[in-house]
Amino acid sequence: MADQSAPAGSLPAGSLPAESPPSKTPPGRTLPARARVVIVGGGVGGTSVAFHLAERGERDVVVLDRDELTSGSTFHSAGLVGQLRADPTLTRMNMHSVELYRRLQRGEHAPGWVECGGIRLACTPERMEEIRRQIGWARTFGLPLEEISAAQAQELFPMMDTAGVLGGAHLPTDGYIDPSQLTYALAAGARAEGVRIITHTRVLGIEQRDGRVTGVRTDRGDIEAEVVVNCGGMFAAEIGRMAGVRIPLVPMSHQYLVTEALPGLPGRGDATRRRLPTLRDPDNLVYFREEVDGLLMGGYERDSAAWSLGSLGSGAGPRGTGYDAIPADFNGRLLPEDWPRFEEITVNSQVRVPGMADVGIRKLINGPEAFTPDNEFCLGETELGGLFVAAGFCAHGIAGAGGIGQVMASWVLDGDPGLDVWHMDVRRFGAHYRSPSYTLKKTTENYETYYDIPYPGRERTAGRPLRVSPAYAWHAAHGAVFGEKAGWERVNYYAPNGGQEGRSQGGGSDEGLRPHGWAGRHWSPAVGVEHAATRETAGLFDESSFSKIEVTGPGAARLLDWLCDNEVAREIGAVTYTQALNARGGIECDFTVTRTADDAFLIVTGTAFGTHDLSWIRRHARSLNGERAGSVRVADVTGQYACFALWGPRSRDILAGLTPAALDNDAFPYLTAQETTVGDVPVRALRVTFTGELGWELYCSSEYGAALWRTLWEAGRPYGLTAAGYHAIDSLRLEKGYRVWGADIGPDDNPYEAGLGFCVKLGKPGGFLGRDALVAARAAGLGRRLRCIVLDDPRAVCLGSEPVRVNGQILGRVTSGGFGHTTGLSIAYAYLPAGAEAQRIGPDTKVEVELFGEWVTGRITGGPLFDPKGERIRA
């Protein structure tokens, strides 16, 4: 490959042209003293947020940029726009982007949108499976993604070599866009509606008072503001620090090159010809798109480099804030070319497009892009009220920019993004991401595995172990296979349990139950053994990772009664399962609330949801505290307490010999809590379950945790107690129909649709947040309902998001699925139409679910599949 590089720090002629020339802010122009919304950052994110705010009617907006528009990461972005993602929300956002780009292309300020289609190749059978799975997702969105052969791919992209290609997928509505032109088009649209865009103005500080943002300080004066939106891109972490807020992202060096004219380009020089589709070859880590008369080619190398304070490469790591700090004068600039690190990508590109070996190179472009620890955006309101963020675009921000602007405008104006964006919410990151070194480890791992197939059950390894239970050493010594969630080491299952004779029902040996395909990749017979033991005798589970939140103070009962749809301010010792809803009636949180004193409550929620739920409660506590200062205190106490769950028909017998508390139904009813002792350990015992079995969750101060686990284990062995992990919990809960937030339920689902109407107490004095929306939903009638599906082939196991069809019509997608070891069934859940027009859908209705390109038959069932009357949990 001939190297005809341009000077470092400049873009090649013809690459990413910006037809709208930037205009500097006149030196004499003064800043406004006040604006309702100040957006910091004039890249594609900031201008999209401004554009969508203006479209919604909010014109009192100021956009500030330290230099010219697009001078951060936007100007050197590759500009590919792919719509389909594994996540339904991001797919919808990207689809909105394409609709917006089409509309802008027809307007006065065309952004250079080229709807040329996109190809994704598969060079391994596993990648072909992934593509077929993606085609199934696409059906549920109405996206015309189709499987194509290697020959068909070559017909669309003639310069490619088909060697090793098994097939691919083609989406004709994908394309690419000029990032700079897009930014200027969005800026022009915002300006036309009255938004003020001011360049060459550096933000020096973010003002705050009483937990809310009040404005910004700049090198040209101060602006008072109700809302500040941090759209700083790779500068976002630095801007966040001005307000004491951590934005966990790392600017990573991302490279691509632009070639000279490529002789094999079809119709070269003809401006009216059909453009080549974008081409992704993830097995070779490369992507291509057309650029002038040549190609733009980049990829995600295995030897990545974080960039900070002039430190580039894999040598000594950066120190202090250098993980995400950027030199003050780094505006509109590129990093030095790093050809050795790009060698792997270069070689791979020649495998797929042989002409790359001989073509001249205009420029290797090396620019910093802000990546996050999980390759998802950082969006939403931070812990500082009124301070929002839209950053961490992970090199696919151009595809998502339109959707990001739409979501953020709704978040700012309505207090609700309008979609379930939890996996993009900046609140998803726990306190451990305040560590720059931990953030760097996770971000680097995700960058280097960007194109890896995301098999279910795949576990990341970077930064582990970090958070561990007091019983962690015991688990490790007894063969635990750990998974990681929110930094916690959690037991998935104990490998030695798989060596026992399988006791799970369903017929055949344990190996004979291994699911087909991907669902069988990380499968273990140990899960069936642990599941069966919990049903037949007892299982002991370490739930110390579950998030625990204390809400205390004179206003605690009032706050929680307003936030929860169920009655939680009951007698001391009452345990209540409830949801917290948003104004749309969607399920924002799903947890249990235990009243521990007149002015104290303990909330227990999922491991990964603690930061979200904590932020949701604190946000509403702020308004209450504004009325009565200090009336509510909200604290994360997760690490203070260990929690072990003892579940199963022999759990009462095991516990009875260890505690002075009476455990019969009259003395210790279901959904109550008591302070007692277990062995030598003081505990709070909650009679609750997530497996559908009799049992207790036992909470103790963390220093007692190892002793409590040991005590339970030794006392339970004569009864057949089995130590068990989270994979067994998931199988057990599927049979009982227990919902999981983030999969089966979320902000877009109301309790009636989700089958949780029994929690809703519409008659509560004072009402609750979301009540009006629920009343309206009931009056209008349910349009859909979460249904349980049983597949005819028990080894055909759903992973989530598979399309579901009835009578040949796709009507929904799977929310979660798995194998029930007691029932011997493959179980899945999906929202399907309800109401008068869907009377044909009900128990025993035949359905089909698409698994990797094959339609598998099944039927809808009514009620929980195991113990539908709940007799075992109240035994």
Image: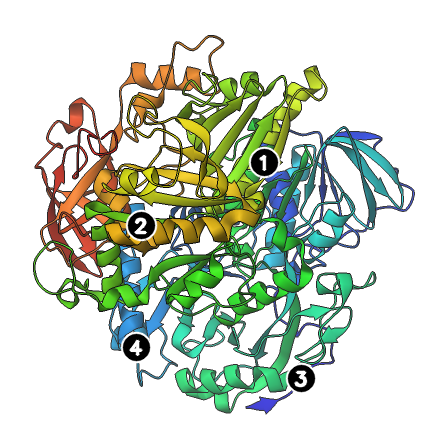
Q: Which mark is residue 332?
A: none
| Cα–Cα gap, marks 2 and 3 | 71 Å
Foreground of the two, 40 or 654: 654
- The residue labelled by disc 2 is 716
Residue 736 appears left or right of 572: left
| Cα–Cα gap, marks 4 and 1 | 43 Å
Residue 46: x and y in percent read 65, 46
Residue 494: x and y in percent read 33, 63
Q: Earlier in the sequence, mark 4 or mark 2?
A: 4
In this rendering, the count of numbered labels is: 4
- The residue labelled by disc 1 is 615
| Cα–Cα gap, marks 1 and 3 | 49 Å
Q: Earlier in the sequence, mark 4 or mark 1?
A: 4
> Which residue lies at the image location 74% right of the left edge and 74% below the top edge?
311
Vertical placement of residue 261 versus 718, above or below: below
Closer mark to the observer between disc 4 and disc 2:
2
Quadrant housing residue 520? bottom left
> Which residue lies at the image location 49% right of the left edge and 53% below the top edge?
706
Amino acid bearing label 3: Ser
Closer mark to the observer between disc 4 and disc 3:
4
Can residue 115 be seen? yes
Amino acid bearing label 2: Gly
- The residue labelled by disc 3 is 5
Q: Earlier in the sequence, mark 2 or mark 1?
A: 1
Please tell me whether mark 4 sits on a helix, a strand or a loop: loop
Residue 468: x and y in percent read 52, 57
